[in-house]
Image (cartoon, grey):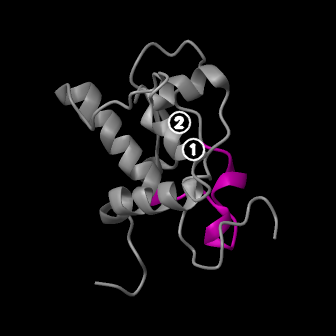
Amino acid sequence: MGSKHIGPSGLFSAQNGILLKDSVRSFFDLFLVSVSPDHGHKIVCFTQDLEQVGGRVLSSTTRLAQNQNLTVSDDILRWHFHQCSLTNMKGTGQRMWDLSTSEDDSIDTLLDDPDAAEIIDVDMRNRLGPYVEVDGVD
């Protein structure tokens, strides 16, 4: 099994993501940069485009694999783009993640758990499930 393999279940795991330059990742996490899967996978900037990525198209290596488990999820990109739009156009999208840590931080407690990956995976599936379309299910 290669590092790109998501698994036989076909579920996208929280451990998988897009490799981004650090400054672009920060903008992505803050809902200031996104990818629109419905507009040719173009990168959209919701702030001053200091990295000059706006209007570029996401690399075909991330989206044209025959095995859907090896590609970026259009459903997740669509969800992220929607949150960017809400955050920047209406003023509020999903709540921002609290990335601060402290000595009694619950994320540290969670990460110390031997089943942390599975717990995070289930939580992400529960949160993002409504945004993911499954073929053959109405």
Q: Give the quarter of the figure containing the C terminus.
A: bottom left
Tag count in the figure?
2
Read off the residue under disc 1. Answer: 111
- In depth, the one of 98 and 92 nearer the eye is 98
Q: Amino acid at mark 1?
A: Leu
Q: Secondary structure at mark 1?
A: helix
**Residue furthest bottom in the image:** 136
Distance Cα–Cα, label 2 vs label 1: 5 Å
Tell me residue 60's x, y (percent): 68, 52
Question: Which residue occupies 43% across, 56% down?
Answer: 124
Residue 7 higher or lower than 72, as above or below: below
Q: Secondary structure at mark 2?
A: helix
Q: Which residues are magenta?
A: 58-75
Left of 4 or right of it: where is 50?
A: left
Read off the residue under disc 2. Answer: 108
**Residue furthest left in the image:** 90
Look at the image and tell me whether residue 101 can be seen. Answer: yes
Question: Which residue occupies 33% across, 30% down?
Answer: 96
Q: Are marks 2 and 1 in contact (CB under 8 Å)?
A: yes
Residue 19 higher or lower than 60, as above or below: above
Tell me residue 92's x, y (percent): 21, 29
Q: Give the quarter of the figure containing the N terminus.
A: bottom right
Residue 71 higher or lower than 34, as above or below: below
Question: Which residue occupies 50% across, 45% down?
Answer: 110
Q: Is residue 8 magenta?
A: no
Look at the image and tell me whether residue 53 can be seen. Answer: no
CA neighbours of label 2 inside 10 A, class few (<14), some (14 to 19), many (20+): few
Question: Which residue occupies 51% across, 41% down?
Answer: 109
